[in-house]
Image (tube, rainbow, N blue to C red):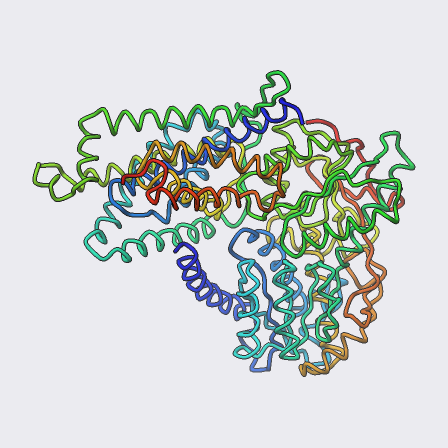
């Protein structure tokens, strides 16, 4: 009964959200010109349990579109100084947004609707890998390019899809970074790490991360797996999970959690005085603005394998420019996930511009030929270049630690702006 | 496996269980008096949590201080919902009542997201932030207070329903509305009272929960499914049943989460529920 009513509710709210999305999309588009716009569909969770992340990430894409469409002579970001896309007679991008409510079926239906009714030429999204999985299938069937800058589960690009392109590294590559980081850290500290506990949520993203972590232990024999705990996303409490961690006594805990449970875990760790040497997490929570705003000083000293941090601005001025714009527009600090989404939108726009056409095949061809230099990116990567699977091969990871309630880059040690606080002080 | 660990699990489970119970009691009360399932129950919880959190962040008032005010305000809110919405659909078909509370749920969730955004808010460093250690067992203060609060709240409600004249009227309406009307009982007022009391209970639960839980527009949905199972397990309309079932669920899910995989920790809870309704379709303490 409840399920039936829930699904009725979903169809009600999915009717309501696209409406607002269309309004928002048309506001972003230029009203005066009769020129054709380039329609791009963006799918994010704007209601439901991960709405906060969806909102922040979509905002970054909106900012990218705004920079592309408007004229910003003061910025050094590609497409800032011109209006629209130069090779398409300065055509502007019209962003059509939809709320997939963190639900893979709704995501697929919305993607279908955008392609058949709104005639989008490309899709971008979706934050949750589970939704990216269904949306990419719809895109593949309809032969429309789908770009993701924030869905990390490894299998997405292992299925031989021709229309899926991913700028962000896979969860497998990111999992490896934890071991590289810990090995590097062990060489520099007395407080050495031997045992690792893995805690992950149980949608596609978390499960894949858990598997990837388990798979890397053989290459890093100095570490042993203390315990691997998968938990239900949207759980009421994590007492039993934390009790299992306390019993396993790991040196560090490595998390794959979204904001809500990250907050809950952090609070429960504190409640039960669980103090491992470090709590590490794959980006998405534990250093996000949502996490920091909710926990204030209790958000300090968590370590996150990030892609991006504001304090890298003096290495790359584009980071500062975009970070400031985001802060000004949305009144909050930009996180790694929004920064990656911003980058993905820029890569997509670059490909459409080079294609000089809005034909999906032309965009796909241009995406395959993408080879962007580090100087044109806001990410601290070595570039953007896709392999045959559509996976960007030039990514690079950093670790940030929240210190004085702001994330600071602490690894790689040669890039670090701030010295790592290790072990994590009890609070 | 030590006795200490088992005790810790039991105590942690009890802590969560009393909160599940407190959330479920309001649901049981409304069902008991009116035979209506309030689908917006979780959203009542969300509103009271927002109230506690904003009183803390904006006014610096600890949830312990604001608890009575939140409870009273929620009582008013419950009564208002009854008179403005429920009273109008009461004469209609069963499904129009269901859709009314369901619509209210969608409305309140969307209104919260519109007003406060999708941000997470939480109370850090409240008066009840600490922990108490007895032997090797760690007791988080917020959960102790929540447990005590839940027991007190249930006791008061029990006394009100079973030991007072008003309570007798409430029960009369729940047993036979028409007969109660002929006895001169104002059924409307009793219904409004049930909604007010249910909302006040959830106000107390929300205040206690805000000490250690985050709030966002969908926080109600996280708890309400457990509340439905609690009410169904305890017996629809039974306050004592909701208390017993809530505690049982809290303990069971902590133990199964520890000894089985965490993702399946609610499986034994639902299995227990199925088992009980097979042999007692009205739930543990439900009316036959």
Q: In the image, A205: left or right of B204?
A: right
In front here: A413 or B145? B145
Question: Left or right of A106: which side holds A212?
Answer: right
Q: Is B277 above or below relative to A269?
A: below
Q: Quadrant of the N terminus of chain B?
A: top right
Q: Residue furthest right?
A: A187
Q: Nearer the viewer, residue B143 or A46?
A: B143
User: In x, y percent, where is residue A149?
Assistant: 70, 62
Residue B266 visible here? yes
Q: Residue at x 71, y 82 (%)?
A: A361
Answer yes or no: is residue B55 visible.
no
Q: Quadrant of residue A296?
A: top right
Question: Which residue: 76% across, 80% down?
Answer: A365
Q: Residue furthest front?
A: B279
Which quadrant is home to the C terminus of chain B? top left
Q: Is residue A269 left or right of residue A353?
A: left
- In percent of width and height, residue B152 lies at 38, 24
Q: Is residue A5 above or below residue B274?
A: below
Of A252 and A401, which appears nearest the observer?
A252
User: Residue at 70% across / 75% down in the picture?
Assistant: A85
Task: State the image quarter where residue A339 is shown.
Answer: bottom right
Q: Tell me where residue A221 appears, x and y as whole percent.
A: 88, 43
**Up-down relation of residue B260 to residue A270 (above or below):** below
């Amino acid at each position: 009964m409840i399920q039936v009513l829930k699904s009725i509710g979903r169809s009600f709210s999915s009717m309501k959200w696209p409406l607002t999305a269309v309004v928002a999309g048309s506001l972003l588009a230029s009203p005066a010109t009769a020129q054709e716009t380039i329609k791009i569909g963006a799918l994010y969770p704007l209601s439901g349990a991960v709405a906060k992340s969806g909102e922040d990430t979509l905002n970054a894409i909106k900012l990218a579109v705004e920079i592309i469409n408007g004229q910003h002579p003061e910025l050094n970001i590609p497409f800032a100084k011109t209006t629209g896309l130069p090779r398409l007679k300065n055509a502007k991008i019209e962003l059509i947004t939809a709320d997939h409510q963190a639900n893979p079926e709704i995501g697929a239906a919305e993607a279908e609707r955008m392609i058949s009714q709104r005639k989008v030429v490309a899709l971008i999204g979706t934050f949750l890998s589970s939704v990216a999985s269904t949306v990419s299938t719809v895109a593949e069937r309809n032969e429309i390019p789908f770009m993701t800058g924030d869905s990390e589960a490894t299998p997405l690009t292992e299925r031989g899809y021709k229309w899926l392109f991913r700028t962000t590294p896979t969860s497998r590559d990111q999992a490896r970074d934890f071991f590289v980081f810990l090995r590097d850290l062990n060489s520099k500290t007395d407080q050495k790490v031997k045992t690792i506990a893995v805690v992950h949520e149980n949608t596609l993203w978390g499960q894949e991360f858990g598997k990837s972590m388990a798979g890397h232990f053989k290459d890093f024999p100095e570490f042993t797996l203390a315990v691997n705990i998968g938990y239900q996303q949207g759980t009421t409490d994590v007492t039993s999970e934390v009790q299992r961690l306390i019993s396993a006594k790991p040196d560090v805990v490595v998390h794959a959690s979204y904001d809500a449970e990250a907050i809950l875990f952090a609070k429960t760790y504190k409640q039960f005085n669980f103090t491992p040497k470090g709590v590490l997490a794959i980006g998405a929570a534990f250093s996000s603005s949502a996490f920091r705003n909710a926990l204030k000083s209790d958000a300090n000293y968590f370590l996150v394998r990030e892609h991006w941090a504001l304090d890298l601005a003096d290495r790359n001025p584009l980071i500062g420019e975009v970070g400031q714009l985001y802060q000004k527009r949305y009144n909050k600090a930009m996180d790694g996930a929004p920064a990656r989404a911003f980058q993905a939108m820029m890569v997509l726009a670059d490909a459409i511009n080079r294609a000089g056409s809005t034909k999906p095949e032309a965009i796909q061809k241009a995406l395959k030929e993408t080879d962007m230099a580090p100087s044109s990116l806001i990410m601290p990567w070595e570039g953007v270049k896709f392999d045959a699977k559509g996976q960007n091969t030039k990514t690079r990871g950093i670790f940030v630690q929240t210190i004085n309630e702001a994330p600071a880059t602490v690894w790689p040690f040669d890039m670090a702006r701030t010295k790592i606080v290790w072990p994590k002080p009890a609070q | 496996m030590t006795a200490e660990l088992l005790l810790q699990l039991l105590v942690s489970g009890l802590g969560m269980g009393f909160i599940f119970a407190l959330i479920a009691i309001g649901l049981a009360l409304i069902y008991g008096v009116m035979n209506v399932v309030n689908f917006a129950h979780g959203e009542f919880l969300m509103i009271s949590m927002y109230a506690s959190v904003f009183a803390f962040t904006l006014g610096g008032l600890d949830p312990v201080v604001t608890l009575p005010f939140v409870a009273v305000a929620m009582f008013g809110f419950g009564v208002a919902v009854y008179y403005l919405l429920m009273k109008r659909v009461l004469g209609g078909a069963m499904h129009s009542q269901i859709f009314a509370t369901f619509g209210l749920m969608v409305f309140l969730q969307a209104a919260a997201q519109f007003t406060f955004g999708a941000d997470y808010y939480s109370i850090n460093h409240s008066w009840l932030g600490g922990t108490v250690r007895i032997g090797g067992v760690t007791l988080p203060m917020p959960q102790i207070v929540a447990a005590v609060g839940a027991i007190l709240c249930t006791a008061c409600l029990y006394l009100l329903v079973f030991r007072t004249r008003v309570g007798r009227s409430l029960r009369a309406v729940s047993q036979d509305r028409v007969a109660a009307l002929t006895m001169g009982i104002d059924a409307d007022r009793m219904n409004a009272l049930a909604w007010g009391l249910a909302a006040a209970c959830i106000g107390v639960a929300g205040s206690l929960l805000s000490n250690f839980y985050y709030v966002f527009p969908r926080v109600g949905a996280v708890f309400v499914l457990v509340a439905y199972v609690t009410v169904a397990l305890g017996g629809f309309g039974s306050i004592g049943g909701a208390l017993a079932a809530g505690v049982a669920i809290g303990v069971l899910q902590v133990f199964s989460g520890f000894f089985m995989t965490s993702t399946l920790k609610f499986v034994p809870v639902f299995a227990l529920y199925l088992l009980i309704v097979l042999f007692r379709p009205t739930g543990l303490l439900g009316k036959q």
